[in-house]
Image (cartoon, grey):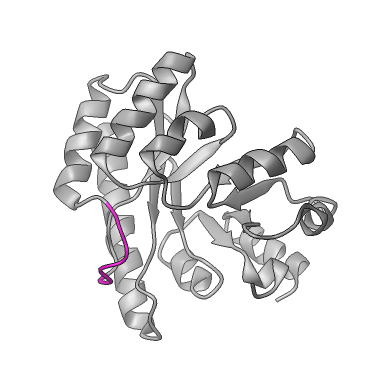
Amino acid sequence: MQYSDLVTYLKKNNATLVAVSKTKPVSQIKKIYARGQRIFGENRVEELVSKKAEMPSDIEWHFIGSLQSNKVKKLIPHASLIHSVDRLSLIEEIQKRSLTADVVTNILLQPKIATEEAKQGLEIHELSQIIENYSKGKYPNLKIKGLMGMATFTSDQDQVAEEFSTLKQAFDRIRDKYKIMGFETLSMGMSGDYEIAIKHGSNMVRIGSLIFGER
């Protein structure tokens, strides 16, 4: 699918595109920027920071990779949204560093929906407790914007659909119960499964290879 066709499809389905630019040179990112793309996703802190310095200031840089706690301090001033907040200790570190920097950091919580052991994420009971604490003001320097999830890497589309559906149900429960201001983003779906994700409620997709080509 061409970039323009992808943008048209996503716009029709009210989904935001995060162009996953990890490992890609600035020269390639500039070509997509010139076509109107303003949200890019990186999975390494140093790479995000260096690319941000070279690119126009109107870009939103999303961090989409696994985030180590010792990298949080360096990332906070540069990320518009951190997708992959997958453990309580990381939430507490982001809160701590955001408080020190006197900023509010936008995050997405990542529950574990995949069956793969390698996939990380919060258990449902952890997710509920975090949201409960957040709604009571425990993390004043965080803004939880929604949820992010990664499905199992499998050709079984029914399994992928079921996992995305599980995340959408959790998203709806939280939104309906807590009425959190700004809790509106459900980030799920990548190049291989974004259509299934959108069918099951995704409003933000993270796509790299369909835009930049295979790595």
Q: How many marks?
A: 0
User: In the rendered view, would you say 19 is above or below 54?
Assistant: below
Please indicate whether residue 14 sits to the left or right of residue 51 in the image: left
With 179 as the anchor, is 21 left or right in this view? right
On whether residue 119 falls in the magenta region, the answer is yes
Residue at 39% over, 43% down = 68
Reply above or below: 86 against 116.
above
Quadrant where the N terminus is found in the figure: bottom right
Examine the residues drawn in magenta and state their main secondary structure. loop
Q: Is residue 183 visible?
A: no
Residue 17 at what x, y percent from top left? Answer: 62, 55
- Magenta residues span 115-121
Which quadrant is home to the C terminus?
bottom right
* Residue found at x 19% / y 41%: 128
Residue 18: image x %, image y %?
60, 53
The single residue placed furthest to the bottom in the displayed view is: 155
